[in-house]
Amino acid sequence: MKHLILVLIIGSLGCVSYEKDDRDQAIQHVVLCWLKEPRNQLHRNQIIEVSKTFRNIPGVLEVRVGEVIESDRAIVDDSFDVAILVVVPDGKCLQDYLDHPLHQKAKKKVLLPLVKKVVIYDFQE
């Protein structure tokens, strides 16, 4: 009988619904940057530091930024220099982030002068 009760309790847990927060269906905005001067540490650092300021833009839930990890594995693309991840709750906030003066200033003053190629992937969980 104890086993039956335990099975019923465990089985019913799948029916419990949890309230989702903004991150559950957030948009992940992934930006890969190739520098005009590949592997230039000063330029990598400038992009990393300016990208951290995106945390101050309203609607941005999270910002992560870092350098490429070199790999010998053929499946890994390690040709870029810096990756930036910006998480926003929805499409409107993504557009607001892109249009925000802080983002536009960083793009104009740091990214465009230093970066030769950018590839962006947007996806939603």
Image: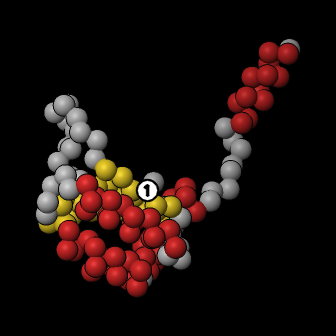
| Quarter of the figure with residue 121 | bottom left
Q: In this view, does 123 lie to the left or right of 120?
A: right
Q: Is residue 8 above or below residue 102?
A: above
User: Which quarter of the image is occupied by the N terminus?
Assistant: top right
Foreground residue among 45 and 61: 45
Amino acid under disc 1: Arg
Residue located 20% across and 68% down the image: 114
| Quarter of the figure with residue 75 | top left
Q: Is residue 38 left or right of residue 109?
A: left
Q: Is residue 69 visible?
A: yes
Q: How crowded is mark 1: few (under 14 residues within 10 Å), some or many (20 or more)?
A: some
Q: Position of residue 43 (x, y in %)?
A: 25, 62
Q: In this view, does 43 lie to the left or right of 24?
A: left
Q: How many labels does the image show?
A: 1
Q: Is residue 6 left or right of residue 61?
A: right
Residue located 62% across and 59% down the image: 21
Q: Is residue 119 visible?
A: no
Q: Name the residue under label 1.
A: 64
| Quarter of the figure with residue 98 | bottom left
Quick one: which residue is furthest to the right in this view?
A: 1
Residue located 31% across and 50% down the image: 67
Foreground residue among 18 and 94: 94
Foreground residue among 107 and 99: 107
